[in-house]
Amino acid sequence: MTRWLAPLFLVLALGPAQAQETEETDPGLMKRGAELFLRGLMNEIGPELNQMQDSLRDLQPELQKLVELMGDFRNYEMPEKLPNGDILIRRKPDLPKPPTLPEGPEIEL
């Protein structure tokens, strides 16, 4: 019986120490796998993100004009979609009328 107890205690005592040692020295397959996954993802979608950034940079002046035209967005009601697919954004009725815009060149549709 004592022959079995000594090796059993030795195995039980060294088991957690070995497990702790492997966790500290090895950064882990999960961490390396996550790094490889994220690098691959950035390599794949990186060009599309750059293209989207360029497109948004080109769109910025037009969005600025829209913000100047509309003013505070709280002056408008929620958009409503009409049966024909048009989207209507009504100005709240209790607000003063917006300033008139200068007429630009006529566009033929």
Image (cartoon, rainbow, N blue to C red):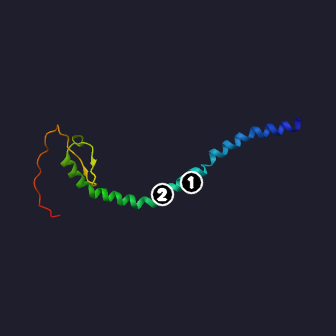
Residue furthest to the bottom: 108
**Closest to the observer, 101 or 93:** 93
Residue furthest to the front: 83
| Image disc number at residue 33 | 1
| Image disc number at residue 41 | 2
Q: Residue at x 68, y 43 (%)?
A: 19
Q: Residue at x 50, y 54 (%)?
A: 38
**Element class at badge 1:** helix
Instruction: Locate residue 59, reporting x and y percent.
Output: 27, 56
Q: Mark 2 and mark 1 in contact? Answer it, CB < 8 Å.
A: no
Q: Residues within 10 Å of mark 2 (few under 14, many from 20)?
A: few
User: Residues under labels 2 and 1: Cα distance?
Assistant: 12 Å
Q: Quadrant of the C terminus?
A: bottom left
**Element class at badge 2:** helix
Left or right, 23 with respect to 35, comes to right
**Closest to the observer, 34 or 107:** 107
Q: Quadrant of the N terminus?
A: top right
Q: Quadrant of residue 51?
A: bottom left
Three-letter code, disc 1: Gly
